[in-house]
Image (spheres, rainbow, N blue to C red):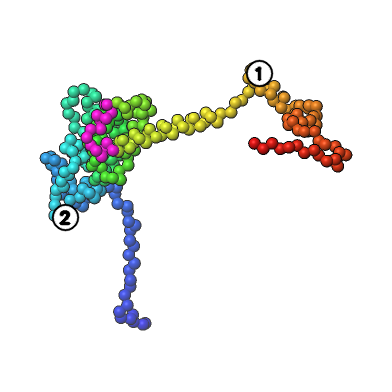
Amino acid sequence: MAKPKKGSKKTAIKRVAPLSPPPPSVVDYNQPLKSPYVRFTILRICHDCYQIPTHYLDAYSKLRPGPYSTEICLSDIDKDIGHTLVHFLYEGCYETLQVPVEDSTHGVRLEFQRALQVYYAADVYEIHGLGALAKRYIEKLGDVLSISTILQAVRKVHSRLPPNETWLHNYLHAKLQGAFDADEDIFSRDEFYQGLGDENVCTQTVMKMVVKIYAGAVSSLRARGTESSDVELHIDPSDPPTPVQSGLETVAEDLSAGPVEADEVPVEACVEELCDLPTATPLEYCDQPVEQQPISVF
């Protein structure tokens, strides 16, 4: 009987039980690795200071603080819209603080002025979502305001806008065009120019728009005049002819009949009638000498 060889071992095969799926998690909310509310940035708007978590500013490059600073000074932003700006950074929606006003009209004027200030802030600091909301309320509130009131509000922010700004420029031109279409004498009234004030840049811009509107009106009148002169006269054959038309038809018939034939007159007779010429001498008498008449000398 052969002896078993040393070092040989039997390998046992272990059976692994199939993995069971993990139990469903009851945690269905976000779990960040770090709290975003630890670091704060201070937004200083005039004399008001607003604390806002720094991570809320990550999407806006012009609102990020420096590496060694926790404060941003927005000196060109109006104090009245500080809350609107910060509230949008927190909540993503538009909101203003309520203030006592004399009447509803004054309240609309105030909110229109605020919307313009918000638009300026959003444009300068590239807060695009806030800028879209400001445009919406500028258009909505401006629909119930006079062009003079709109000009008074626009002139307060116009000179601070960047030179490549286009939306407010186009909006103002559209409002001026609408005011002119409703009342062609609007640009000749004193209250219109009172809305311009002493802001030279805004005044020049508005006057360029006014001249452009007048030029467009003149071109339109010229085009209408040209169209009127090109209109053809159409006569219905079933209508009875007017005296003028009858006269024209008679002349046309006379012309179509051709030239009127007259008795032919010899050319010689016409010449003799017009010119008193001497009688020609017959050829047979040409050999006879001609009696010379003395010539009188003066």
Would you name the residue on which mark 1 appears? 241
Q: Earlier in the sequence, mark 1 or mark 2?
A: 2
The quarter of the rendered structure image containing the N terminus is bottom left
Q: CA distance from mark 1 to mark 2?
A: 95 Å
Q: Residue at x 27, y 30 (%)?
A: 193
Q: Which residues are magenta?
A: 190-204
Q: Is residue 280 visible in the rendered structure shown here?
A: yes
- Give the class, few, some or many, for how many residues have Cα within 10 Å of label 2's Cα (few <14, many ≥20): few
Picture quarter containing residue 149?
top left
Picture quarter containing residue 80?
top left
Asked whether residue 195 is drawn in magenta, I would say: yes
Q: Residue at x 33, y 58 (%)?
A: 17
- In front: mark 1 or mark 2? 1
Q: Is residue 231 above or below residue 13?
A: above
**Residue 191 placement (x, y as % from top left):** 26, 26
**Residue 199 placement (x, y as % from top left):** 23, 37
- Give the class, few, some or many, for how many residues have Cα within 10 Å of label 1's Cα (few <14, many ≥20): few
Asked whether residue 28 is drawn in magenta, I would say: no
Q: Identify which residue, 2 or 87, lies in the foreground.
A: 87
Which amino acid is tagged 2? Pro
Secondary element at tag 1: loop
